[in-house]
Amino acid sequence: MEAKVISLRVSPAVAQALERAARARRTSKSRLILESIEGLLKREPQQSSYELGKDLFGRYALGLGDASTRTRKLFQEYAFAKHARRQRPARRAVRR
């Protein structure tokens, strides 16, 4: 497997901590970072974007739990309500 080089920018405090940890383990900073990332990726479940957010889709924007499955009906209700508002007779100023 061919290795790919990645640059990483860290704060001076993190750089010092990384240097100390690498010295204590008698390994390179690159090896320490690589092992940390590999460990993190093994612990994290590999889920798709859909799996991560499926309980949120279509739920909070309108306050309806089934908005994503009833979009046509909701749009019709919105359009009819907007049309009804426009059909109201205009109020006229009363002259005395």
Image (cartoon, rainbow, N blue to C red):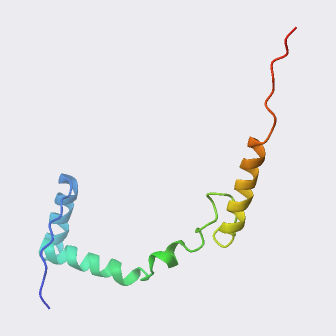
Residue pushed farthest top? 96
Count of numbered tags: 0
Q: Where 53 sits versus 94, above or below? A: below
Q: Position of residue 16 (x, y in %)?
A: 17, 58
Camera-side residue of 61 and 46? 61
Q: Position of residue 44 (x, y in %)?
A: 41, 79
Q: Position of residue 28 (x, y in %)?
A: 11, 75
Quadrant where the C terminus is found in the figure = top right
Q: Where 5 sits versus 88, above or below? A: below
In-image side of 35 versus 67 (left or right): left
The part of the image, by quadrant, that contains residue 93 is: top right
Q: Where 90 sits versus 58, above or below? A: above
Residue pushed farthest right? 96
The part of the image, by quadrant, that contains residue 19 is: bottom left
> Which residue is depicted at the point 53% across and 71% down?
53
Camera-side residue of 92 and 48? 92
> Which residue is depicted at the point 50% across and 74% down?
52
> Which residue is depicted at the point 74% across and 58% down?
77
Quadrant where the N terminus is found in the figure = bottom left
Q: Where 55 sits versus 80, above or below? A: below
In-image side of 90 versus 42 (left or right): right
> Which residue is depicted at the point 78% across and 47% down?
84
In-image side of 44 versus 31 (left or right): right
